[in-house]
Image (cartoon, rainbow, N blue to C red):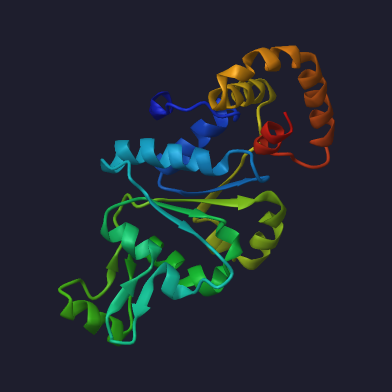
């Protein structure tokens, strides 16, 4: 029933949204895969808020954006120059009993940044070095990172990076995530794009109606293009 509580309308098939929700409810972390502008981040934020509220009583998730320089410190954490433990995004979310959004998941070096975290999520406990444990103990915290039973991550990645990512991950790591392909639903997309354009400026309503035939022809063209390369909804909004 969580899908009925999502108060936004995306140009994504309802069955896809339901699949994401079922994975989260069933204990899986989720990676949303799709072309730029198809609504991955918007879907992720909506689902994290709604399903998170249902499962852990919190709709405020922790957001992070991965990049090529990420290491274990960005994900789990590490001691700084004055020997204080500075937490990474997984640690912050876990200790605040929040869910976690990682945008551009595959931009990071997967093994370097996430390898240790994957194992910790599986065992619900991330072990730290002796120095890190001591620093946390001095700050009155556990000497390890405890991962809540209902902790979940939703990550986003571009479709053209998917094959590269899967070659970098072992089968064991891949099975800890559900990969869900996100593609626009043409019927819902036309409604969504129109609504988003008119939301910006209601004065465009008459102009949009005048251009409706041209817009329909544009969508026929985009449908053909999508047979070989996915074009995101955001691109359609910009063109129209």
Q: Is residue 239 above or below residue 96?
A: above
Where the C terminus falls, by quadrant? top right
**Left or right of residue 69: residue 158:** right
- Residue at image location 23% in from the left, 82% down from the top: 135
Residue 68 percent across, percent down from the top left: 59, 69
Q: Is 165 on the left-hand or right-hand side of 135?
A: right
Q: Residue at x 59, y 27 (%)?
A: 13
Q: Position of residue 70 (x, y in %)?
A: 51, 71
In this rendering, the answer to whether 208 lies above or below 181 is above
Name the foreground residue: 180 vs 238: 238
Q: Position of residue 78 (x, y in %)?
A: 36, 78
How many numbered discs, if any?
0
Q: Please tell me which residue is depicted at 30% across the width and 53% down the height of the picture.
A: 149
Residue 196 appears left or right of 162:
left
Most distant residue in the front direction: 203
Q: Which of the two residues, 104 or 129, is positioned nearer the viewer here?
A: 104
Dividing the picture into quadrants, the one containing residue 120 is: bottom left
Q: Would you say 143 lies left or right of 13 here? A: left
Relative to residue 216, is residue 113 depicted above or below? Answer: below
Q: Which residue sits at x=68%, y=64%?
A: 167
Which part of the image, by quadrant, shows the N terminus? Answer: top left
Q: In the image, residue 183 lies at what x, y percent?
A: 66, 36
């Amino acid at each position: 029933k969580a899908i009925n509580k999502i108060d936004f309308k995306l140009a994504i098939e309802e069955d896809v949204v339901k699949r994401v929700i079922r994975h989260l409810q069933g204990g899986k972390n989720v990676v949303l895969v799709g072309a730029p502008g198809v609504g991955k981040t918007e879907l992720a934020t909506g689902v994290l808020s709604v399903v998170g509220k249902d499962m852990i009583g919190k709709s405020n998730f922790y957001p992070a954006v991965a990049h090529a320089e990420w290491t274990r410190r960005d994900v789990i954490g590490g001691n700084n120059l004055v020997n204080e433990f500075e937490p990474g995004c997984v640690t912050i979310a876990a200790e605040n009993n929040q869910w976690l959004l990682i945008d551009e998941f595959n931009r990071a070096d997967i093994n370097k940044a996430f390898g240790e975290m994957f194992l910790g999520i599986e065992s619900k406990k991330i072990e730290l070095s002796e120095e890190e444990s001591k620093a946390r103990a001095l700050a009155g915290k556990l000497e390890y990172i405890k991962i809540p039973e209902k902790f979940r991550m939703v990550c986003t990645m571009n479709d053209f990076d998917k094959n590269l990512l899967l070659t970098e991950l072992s089968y064991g790591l891949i099975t800890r995530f559900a990969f869900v392909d996100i593609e626009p639903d043409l019927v819902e997309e036309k409604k969504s794009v129109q609504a988003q354009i008119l939301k910006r400026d209601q004065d465009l309503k008459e102009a949009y109606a005048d251009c409706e035939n041209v817009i329909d022809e544009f969508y026929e063209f985009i449908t053909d293009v999508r047979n070989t390369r996915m074009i995101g909804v955001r691109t359609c909004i910009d063109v129209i």
